[in-house]
Each structure stands twice: as structure tokens, then as C-alpha cells.
Image (cartoon, rainbow, N blue to C red):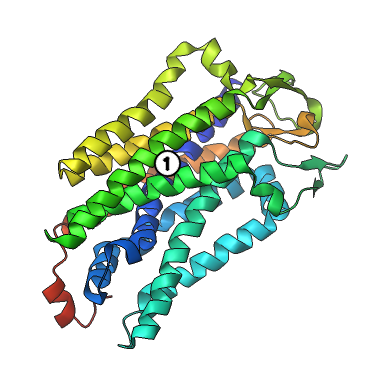
Amino acid sequence: METYFFFKVLWWLLLGVLLIGLGTMVGMDMGVGALLRVVGRTDTERRVALNAIGPHWDGNQVWFILGGGAIFAAFPLIYATAFSGLYIVMLVLLWTMIVRPLGFEYRSKLSSAMWRNVWDWSLVVSGVVPMVVYGAAIGNMMLGVPFHFAWDLTSYYTGSFLALLNPFAVMCGLLSLSLSIYMGGVMLTGRSEAGPMQKRARAAASVAILVAIVLFSIGGIWASHLPGFRLMHSPAPGIAQTPLQQTVELGNGAWFDNYRALPALWIVPALGYIGMLVGFLMIRAGRSTIAWWCGALAWLGVIGTAGVSLFPFLMPSSSDPSQSLTIWNSMSSRNTLIWMTGWTCVFMPAIIAYTSWAFHLMRGAVKADRIASDPHAY
């Protein structure tokens, strides 16, 4: 029982790590795409932006794969419920992700201005939409998702696609997008030569992180007035169970219960503010490397704040709160989690190692004159 409890909590933490890694690494690439037509006023400047993330964007997609794979293997009930009920959202995300590599590969193959403009806008859209969906998904978890289970655990989704685009979720999506744009602006500041493009990237990052601070603050105040979910009764956390064996009630301010019970948890949102505020100062000072790490800290604080607030809930049900999915009732078996932990200990260091090596090897500014003479450049 104690072992199963430990691995449930461990994989809740590892899921948080994957979500933070996704926001940081994939968000950086998406931010560059979202800024492509803002910082790149000429075709050469846009090519510089694309080649700044050219060595990394496809490798960073591993965080998407890891996230989906981890949910499938460690949280099968979450995977089945979310991917069936939120099918349209998944398709929108999939379509934008399909367009993205095509934009990178085809954009500079022809010299036609119209051809390149079409692919430029496809990269902008495929940079904006996934990050808005990412943030909105977390926002909807705070509100609850309209689903319920039958006696045999068949899930039924009773909501609509438009209902997912509610004001709170959209606000969370914009917060996600602003952090992504900040990371993209920081990346371009560090990987472009001194000049107008670098100044525009620094300005965009500065504005984006200030917007993120405002939205994060609004989100916190808003969440304090939302009806949150409270787990009133359930089997012991360390034993196998289903969502049909618990009692959940709604209560105003319930999303702050964990902070009241353990005030030390306030350090998590504090880390988000520290990352954003110091990041703003660093990007204004031109310290792009420190600003990048501050952005990663900001993502940790923002995702961590949502995770701490929701704990132990993962996917609350607004249709029947007592059938909400938690880390106690939606996990795989103990043996599955043990095997997954073993493989994670092997592959996670490898991912960190090759990502670090790639960034070290490809460091430095992208030079416009070299792009023009390189047939392999984007």
C-alpha cells in the first residue's frame, strides 16, 4: 500500500515535470512562430528566426510525445476520458501540429513571395493555437469538465466545444501564449545579431512577460472566487480504486485549501512571480541566457500553482463531482508504475543530455549572410 501511494505521488510530480518541459521547450519554439511576422520584417529576418530554432524545434517535440505517452501509460482513465470527450480539441491541436513541420520544410523552397507568406502565416497560426489550447485545457480543469461514468466506467462527455472556450479558460490560454512569446523573444534575442530584429525581439519578450504577470495575478484572484472541488470521502490513497467509490463536494475557495493547510506551498506561485519579474529585468539588460532560465522558472511556478491547487484532482467532473478523476483513482497498476519509473530513469537523463549538447553545439547568433549561402538552411 505504501509503495503504491509513493509511485502515485511520484508520477503526479513527473507529469508536472513533463508539462513544465513542454511549456518551456515547445513553448519557446511556438513563441518564435507566433513572433515570426512581428520581429521579422524582411524575408531574411524571418529566415534568421526560423534557423534560430531550426536545430531544436523537432527535437523539442519529444516533450509532446512524452506527455501523451505518460498519460496513456500512467493515467489510462484520464487518457481515455479526455481523448474521447475532447476529441475536437485534440483534432484542432493535431491539425496545427501537422502544418508546422510543413511550414519549416517548404517555406524557403521557392522564392515566390506569396508562397513564403502563406507558410509564414501557417507557422504563426501553428505557434499561437497550440499554446492557447494548452493553457485553456488547464483552465478548464479548474472549472471541471462535463463528463460522467456509467456503472461499467464507460465515460460520457456532455459538453460542447464552444463551452470549453469560456472566459476563464481563454484567460489561461492567453497566459500560456504570453509565456510562450516571452520564451520565443528571449531565444531570438540571444540567437540574432545586434540590430533592429534583436531590438524587436527584446521588446516583444518584455511586453509578453508583463502581460503574463498581469494575467497570472488576475487568474489567482479569479480562481479564489471559483467553486472548487473537495474530496470528502474515498478509499485509502494507496489502494486500487475507481471514481465510483468517492464523494466530492463543491465549495467556494476550495482551490486554495491546500495552501491553507500547508502555507509553505505559497512558494510555488512565488517562484512564478520571481521568474517573471527577474526575467523582465534580465531581458531588458540583454542577458538572454539568464532570462531564458527565468522563463523556465516562470513556467515551473505557473504550472506548479495549478497542480498544487488541483491536488489530488486531475480531471474534475462538473457533471457529477463525485466521479472526478484524481491521482488516487486514475492511475495504472503498481507494477506498471514501477516499470515506467525504471525506464524514465534511463531515458530522461538521455533526453536532458542530448538537448543540452544540441544547445551547446548550436550556440551563438545566426548570421544572415551565412543563411543566404547555405542550401540546407530554412
Q: Name above or below for residue 124 compared with residue 149.
A: below
The answer to whether residue 65 shows anywhere in this view is no
Quarter-wise, where is residue 117 in the image? bottom left
Instruction: Report the residue at 15% width, 45% height from top.
Output: 286
Quarter-wise, where is residue 376 in the image? bottom left
* Element at label 1: helix
Q: Is residue 335 left or right of residue 365?
A: right
Q: Is residue 21 left or right of residue 168?
A: left
Q: Amino acid at mark 1?
A: Ile
Q: Name above or below for residue 268 compared with residue 345.
A: above
Expressed as whole percent of the image width and height from the top left, the position of residue 46 reads 27, 70
The answer to whether residue 319 shows anywhere in this view is yes
Instruction: Report the residue at 80% width, 37% height from top.
Output: 319
Q: Residues within 10 Å of mark 1 (few under 14, many from 20)?
A: many
Expressed as whole percent of the image width and height from the top left, the position of residue 71 reads 58, 46
Quarter-wise, where is residue 32 in the image? bottom left
Residue wearing tag 1: 20
Expressed as whole percent of the image width and height from the top left, the position of residue 251 reads 71, 20
Expressed as whole percent of the image width and height from the top left, the position of residue 284 reads 19, 42
Q: Name above or below for residue 309 compared with residue 182.
A: above
